[in-house]
Amino acid sequence: MAAADTHIEREPSRRGPSGIGIVHLGLGAFHRAHQAVYLQRSINRTPTGEESEWGLCSANIRSNRTLVDQLRDGDYRYHVAEFSDSEHVTLREVSAIREALYAGPDGPDREALLARMSNPEVRIVTLTVTEKGYFLSPGSGELLSDAAPIAHDIAHPESPDTAPGMLVEALARRRAAGIAPFTVLCCDNMPHNGQRTRRAVVSLARHRDEALAEWIEASVAFPSSMVDRIVPAMTDADRQRLAALGVGDPGAVVCETFSQWVVEDDFPQGRPDWETDGVEMVADVAPFETMKLRLLNGAHSLLAYLGALAGIETVDAAVARPAFRQLLQHYWQQEAIPTLSLPDGADAGTYTDSLLARFGNDSLHHRLQQIAMDGSQKIPQRWLAGGVERLTADDAISATALGVAGWIRYTVGTDLDGQPHPVDDPMAETFAALHRRHGGDRAALVDAFLALDAVFPATLRDDRLFAQQIVDALMQLESGGVEATITALTLNFSDRDA
């Protein structure tokens, strides 16, 4: 689309003097389009000549050094292109990141990152490292101490590879120096993400020093938060589209206009005046995070696995098909919403209507393959926790069973027409082995997947009707295709739906 066809609003950034008060681990597109934007709003409000104390140091701790170099070369300025639709965009300049570091494998900035986290000016450390970056079992929530990166951090605590390891080392340095601990704010899609982050950090610290672990548990705040903004992975087509709008910086990000951030207000060392910039500061984030995980993320995962099997590439293309819209309505109304305790003022129908509108935004090109990554880490929170509640009450979860069947078939690595796709998951090799062993016996294959206690809780694993629903759905998908299977589900509820 040419720039002349698009209505553009521009919001420049203001960069006054700024100290670095926040370190962020996980310098990805979501961080640049979400937390950094809120910090930029705060900095823009700082009176001219006054110093903001909340500048960002953002670090990649995995594999992307190129982005760090690009941000440095661009003087830490980039644009966030917020599309409400294909014809309306707000170009928001962001300069809140004052330092970018690469502390990934063999990264040159690991010590610089630990030194920055140990600096008393840093009072908050935020994280977007994805669910798998905490090395917690999706089923039990316990630290995966045998995982190679965690085993490395246990053996070499002063040179950590993982986010929990870096938090432990930085906190250990602060404790030894008599510096108050920073607050740890998880911004990943996990239920009770503050508590889970605390568990990862304290459990890892116990391998090093019981006294350090007790100090962290007693002294460090781990508030939970809920983040919401659709930020697709950048593609060459996105870069060309932005170039037509006059945006050429390599750190630019495309996202939707909608943005939400709900944070538990527990910051002993202080925090930005976030509520002035639209952040909801609350006493308990749980109702917000559960609503988002089960309604938005749960629906996204249904679209991802079933849509991919049908050869559909993007979210908007999936929800344009009546069968997929009907599936989402069935899942929301019959299975997800009944498990929720909604936040004050929230209306589930209004929320799901807004989700359909957001999913249908054809300017984002949100790829289903991006959503499908790391399913073993995601579906326990998105589908299975609610499924346990439903089965405990003897209620139906036929849409969840269809989703699990779609996920199992997706892990073969091909769609229903045999076209290959990557299976990007920490358990991908386990899945491949199960398919090799049980590929000719659908019931045995389903039982083998349900036996993965890192994914499935015992309540679901032991429910034979649930297992049979998955087998039936898997066979229907392979014999009749995705949309016919969805239609059969939504028109003919099981005995438990009646």
Image (spheres, rainbow, N blue to C red):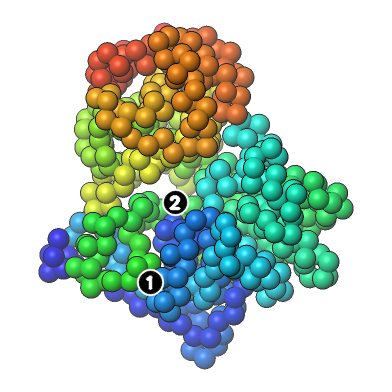
Q: Position of residue 266 (x, y in %)?
A: 67, 59
Viewer-closest of 100 and 122: 100
Task: Assign the C terminus to one quadrant of the image.
Answer: top left
Q: Kindly identify the amino acid type of the residue bearing the numbered disc 2.
A: Asp
The residue sitting at 56% across, 85% down in the picture is 51
Residue 37 drawn above or below residue 130 = below
Instruction: Specify whether residue 459 is in view.
Output: yes
The residue sitting at 68% across, 56% down in the picture is 160
Viewer-closest of 200 and 487: 200
Q: Secondary structure at mark 1?
A: strand
Q: Which residue is mark 2?
A: 228
Disc number placed over residue 273 in the picture, else none: none
The residue sitting at 82% across, 71% down in the picture is 177
Q: Does 22 sit left or right of 8 as displayed?
A: right
Viewer-closest of 363 and 283: 363
Q: Kindly identify the amino acid type of the residue bearing the numbered disc 1.
A: Tyr
Q: Position of residue 190 (x, y in %)?
A: 56, 43
Cα gap from disc 2 to disc 1, whole angstroms: 21 Å
Residue 30 drawn above or below residue 436 = below
Disc number placed over residue 78 in the picture, else none: 1
The residue sitting at 61% across, 24% down in the picture is 453
